[in-house]
Amino acid sequence: MSKERIVRYSAEDIDAIVARGESKTDWARVDAMTDEDIDRAIADDPDWAEFKDIDWSKAVLVVPKPKKSISLRVDEDVIDFFKSTGKGYQTRINAVLRHYMREQKRRNK
């Protein structure tokens, strides 16, 4: 995909586009769709293929808790390792710490 064609819009931008009547979505057609029409459209969508066999009935909405900024001294090789895994390394460090925390709580029950 060419990055030259990627366009980003904020929620406010999208609201303004819809308010001006510039939306390219046929909302009347969407509103008229039945659940069966939606299910059929999903089944025909090649982007959905890898998700169709997932049991979504047990999905849980997770609202992320606010993060707290701290200063933490960490060994250089640990930071280098996480940074080498790419963007989002701080989130991955948090996930590792969360896993450790949950395991400790589970063991102490």
Image: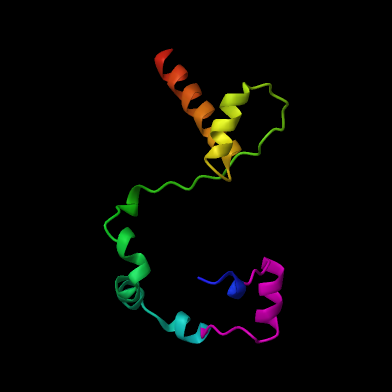
Q: Which residue is painted at 35% across and 47% down in the image? A: 58
In the rendered structure, the answer to whether residue 72 lies left or right of residue 97 reads right
User: 59 or 10, which lies in front?
Assistant: 10
- Determine if residue 66 is in view: yes
- Dividing the picture into quarters, in which one does residue 40 lie? bottom left
In the rendered structure, the answer to whether residue 64 lies left or right of residue 52 reads right
Which color mode does the image show? rainbow
- In the rendered image, residue 63, in percent from the top left (x then y), is placed at 55, 45
- In the rendered image, residue 56, in percent from the top left (x then y), is placed at 34, 53
* Residue most extreme to the top: 108
- In the rendered image, residue 77, in percent from the top left (x then y), is placed at 58, 25
- In the rendered image, residue 18, in percent from the top left (x then y), is placed at 65, 80
- Determine if residue 109 is in view: no
52 relative to 94, above or below = below
* Residue most extreme to the left: 53
User: 72 or 108, which lies in front?
Assistant: 72
Q: Which residue is painted at 53% across and 83% down in the image? A: 25
Tally the marks. 0
User: 79 or 48, which lies in front?
Assistant: 79
**Magenta span contains residue 23:** yes
83 relative to 55, above or below = above
- Dividing the picture into quarters, in which one does residue 76 lie? top right
**Magenta span contains residue 19:** yes
67 relative to 78, above or below = below
User: 56 or 72, which lies in front?
Assistant: 72
71 relative to 63, above or below = above
Query: Which contiguous range is marked in magenta?
Result: 7-26
Which quadrant of the figure contains the C terminus?
Answer: top left
